[in-house]
């Protein structure tokens, strides 16, 4: 009897093997400067790069040689392309009502629809990704001809599009805090990587049709409109919130132009990119809470970004709005989200919140369980920020990462892995095992609240 490997194991094996191979390469003498790095730090760096997170226990620009940096760059590209391909493929299949559990494995007969060509689909993802990354590198090289090499421009372009957040500079991108063109290039790369392959393709086709319009005005699909509108709302809303929390009414001696640029950039990079142009550890507690919310939301399905995704936010918001107004449906725009979609969104939010709570509890034990509260003020917020950043595969940190204990590093590694693959697999399992009930039990009322 022929046995088949569970399709859900493919992404786990793919990322797991990539992480182990990357850690082995990073441990080589040719990869590091000085005395090298430990296995734990090599594994942490490989996990962060493959899961396109950006959390670092050592400085990428000084701890690794050009070869080691190249290994990290390859891991970022493999991780970004891998999750973008798998998630885009999953989204494509689910939108055509094909079982993700049975069809996710690359190489099988994925669809009975003859119009779908898997090879062409995968090539399109790779070509589009490489084209955007090369274009970003060229723009950075032209704008910073005296400050950045061609290699560094390519490294940062790939890291930005893949929402990885790895930088070759110890202060990330702070040196270009006031440079609006450079900030805009990074913002565009991060946003393009964070909205997803299908949205990129459809938006490009929409713009092309709009330019050569002859009869009527082309329309984007409901899904694309939801992704773009929600992303824009979070970027603008996050920028205004950070501008207020950091500069309005506070003692920040910063010009308004600089404040506006940094607020916009931090709002975008919280959508799981991980770069920063300001010192995260010096920001206000209000700003950190705002950033935690943005990191938790993340980007769009089928993208290089992590988080619970912008579509999940819109579905949950529509659910609560509908129930508040006494509606039976969760309406977004002119269309209502299906009951199955609403249930998966609610369960995913609960799954994420429980994971965050448990991880914070464990890290409080490993990183300061024997320290009294009077001597550890601020540690709780720093740990919570680190946990959300890891689970959302963002990579921002208040400075806690390098000082983590060995146990703490393993916890963060697990969170990065879950954040990269967990939601996709979790929803796939739910889809497979959810069945329509044919027996209904009697209902009763309980006192609530």
Image (tube, rainbow, N blue to C red):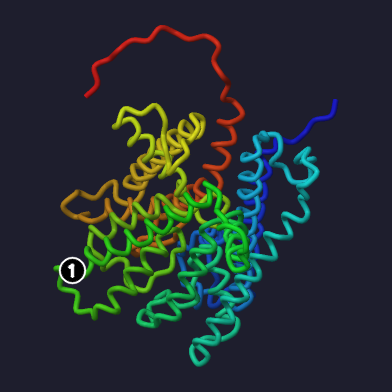
Tell me: 386 left or right of 200.
left
Picture coordinates of residue 125, whole percent (x, y): 67, 59
Q: Residue furthest front?
A: 215
Picture coordinates of residue 254, whole percent (x, y): 23, 79
Quadrant position of residue 444:
top left
* Residue for badge 1: 248
Local secondary structure at mark 1: loop
Picture coordinates of residue 80, whole percent (x, y): 60, 59
Residue displayed at 65% across by 45% down: 92
Q: Residue furthest right?
A: 1
Quadrant where the C terminus sits is top left
Residue displayed at 54% across by 15% down: 437
- Residue 27: tell me if it is visible: no
Above or below: residue 232 compared with residue 384: below
Tell me: 420 left or right of 325.
right
Above or below: residue 442 compared with residue 125: above
Tell me: 54 left or right of 104.
left
Q: What is the crowding at mark 1: few (fewer than 14 residues within 10 Å), some, or many (at least 20)?
A: few
Between 209 and 28, the one nearer to me in the picture = 209
């Amino acid at each position: 009897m022929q046995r088949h490997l569970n399709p859900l194991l493919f992404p786990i094996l793919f990322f797991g093997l990539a992480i182990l191979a990357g850690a082995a390469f990073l441990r080589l003498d040719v990869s590091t400067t000085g005395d090298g790095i430990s296995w734990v730090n090599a594994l942490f760096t490989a996990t962060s790069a493959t899961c396109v997170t950006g959390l670092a226990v050592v400085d990428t620009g000084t701890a690794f040689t050009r070869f080691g940096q190249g290994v990290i760059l390859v891991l970022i590209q493999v991780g970004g392309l891998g999750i973008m391909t798998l998630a885009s493929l999953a989204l494509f299949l689910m939108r055509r009502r094909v079982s993700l559990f049975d069809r996710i494995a690359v190489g099988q007969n994925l669809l009975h629809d003859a119009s779908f060509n898997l090879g062409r689909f995968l090539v399109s993802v790779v070509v589009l990704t490489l084209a955007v990354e090369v274009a970003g590198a060229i723009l950075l090289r032209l704008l910073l001809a005296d400050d950045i090499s061609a290699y560094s421009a390519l490294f940062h372009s790939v890291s930005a599009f893949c929402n990885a957040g790895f930088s070759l500079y110890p202060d990330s991108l702070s040196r270009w805090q006031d440079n609006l063109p450079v900030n805009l290039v990074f913002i565009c790369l991060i946003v393009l990587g964070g909205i997803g392959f299908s949205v990129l393709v459809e938006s490009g086709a929409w713009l092309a049709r709009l330019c050569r319009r002859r009869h009527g005005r082309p329309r984007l699909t409901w899904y694309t409109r939801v992704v773009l509108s929600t992303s824009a709302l979070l970027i603008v809303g996050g920028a205004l919130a950070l501008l207020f929390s950091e500069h309005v009414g506070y003692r920040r001696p910063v010009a308004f132009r600089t404040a506006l640029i940094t607020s916009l950039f931090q709002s975008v990079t919280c959508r799981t990119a991980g770069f920063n142009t300001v010192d995260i550890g010096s920001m206000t507690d209000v700003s950190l809470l705002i950033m935690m919310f943005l990191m938790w939301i993340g980007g769009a399905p089928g993208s290089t970004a992590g988080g619970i995704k912008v579509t999940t936010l819109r579905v949950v918001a529509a659910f609560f709005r509908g129930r508040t107004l006494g509606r039976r449906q969760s309406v977004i725009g002119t269309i209502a989200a299906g009951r199955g979609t609403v249930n998966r969104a609610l369960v995913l939010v609960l799954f994420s919140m429980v994971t965050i709570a448990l991880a914070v509890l464990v890290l409080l034990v490993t990183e300061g369980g024997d320290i009294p509260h009077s001597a550890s003020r601020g540690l709780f917020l720093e740990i919570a920020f680190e946990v959300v950043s890891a689970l959302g595969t963002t990579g921002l940190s208040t400075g806690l990462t390098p000082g983590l204990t060995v146990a703490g590093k393993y916890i963060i590694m697990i969170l990065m892995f879950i954040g990269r693959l967990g939601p996709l697999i979790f929803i796939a399992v739910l889809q497979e095992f959810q069945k329509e009930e044919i027996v209904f039990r009697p209902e009763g009322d309980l006192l609530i609240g």
